[in-house]
Image (cartoon, rainbow, N blue to C red):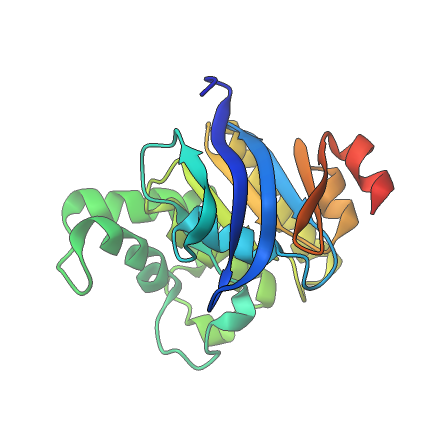
Amino acid sequence: MQHTDAIRIERLTAGYARRPVLREVTATIPRGRITAIVGPNGSGKSTLLGVLAGTVAAQTGRVDRSTTRRPAFVVQHTAIPPTLPITVRDAVAMGRWAHRGPWRRLRAEDREITRTCMERMELTDLATRRLDTLSGGQRQRTLLAQALAQESDLLLLDEPAAGLDEASQAEISRALRQVSATGVTVVQATHDLAEAAGADHCLLLRDGRLKAAGHPDEVLVRT
């Protein structure tokens, strides 16, 4: 594997209950860059993220990762129950469970990492606020901070800006760019072509097959 590739996908077929969703996909994902996966509903974007996250098994083909830590997966903010009675600090600290195990007492190191991740996502002033009092953009930044607390070198996101207003979308885009600048490989599935245009690399899926890959300027004209 070339050192510039974080992930190499070779002739990947994957799906659910023996029903393939992705078919013969071959692609690379560059290290330390933002890759956008685009395509219509049912094209296989979420399935590909699932394979990269390790929650969906390949039926045939292979995925080679040169990343060294377990991927951090960021769900949409709408997937979090609005009445969940925890604070921003509690939610971000849950990212440390990847290292400590659920409900284990956090060490001083864990608390410091939690504080740093909140600071990076500009959440310090919201640390004691409950999730149900936050805007969609604030909740999504909280989930990003939680993922960063896992200290993974691969960040996977499924439609991170979906349902957010324009200002919140800009916040998420800025946050992802900051994360990528630290060397983390970011892969996001998105319907937002403007968001995809700001990525470094783009994969276009259609009917479970890879139709184009490369710089967004070259790929998005084929959507």
Q: Farthest right residue?
A: 221
Classify 184 as above or below 162: above
Classify 205 as above or below 63: below
Q: Farthest top residue?
A: 3
For the N terminus, give its image quadrant. top left
Q: Quadrant of residue 116?
A: top left
User: What x and y, as percent, mark residue 195?
Assistant: 72, 46
Q: Quadrant of residue 203?
A: top right
User: What x and y, as percent, mark residue 147?
Assistant: 40, 50
Q: Farthest bottom residue?
A: 83
Q: Residue at x 59, y 34 (%)?
A: 27
Q: Residue at x 39, y 59 (%)?
A: 127
- On the picture, is 67 further left or further right than 20? left
Q: Nearer the viewer, residue 181 or 125?
A: 181
Classify 59 as above or below 103: above
User: What x and y, as percent, mark residue 187?
Assistant: 55, 43
Q: Is residue 179 in view from this perspective?
A: no
- On the picture, is 140 further left or further right than 62? right
Disc tally is: 0
Q: Is residue 136 in view from this perspective?
A: yes
Q: Nearer the viewer, residue 166 or 196?
A: 196
- On the picture, is 75 further left or further right than 88? right
Q: Residue at x 17, y 52 (%)?
A: 100
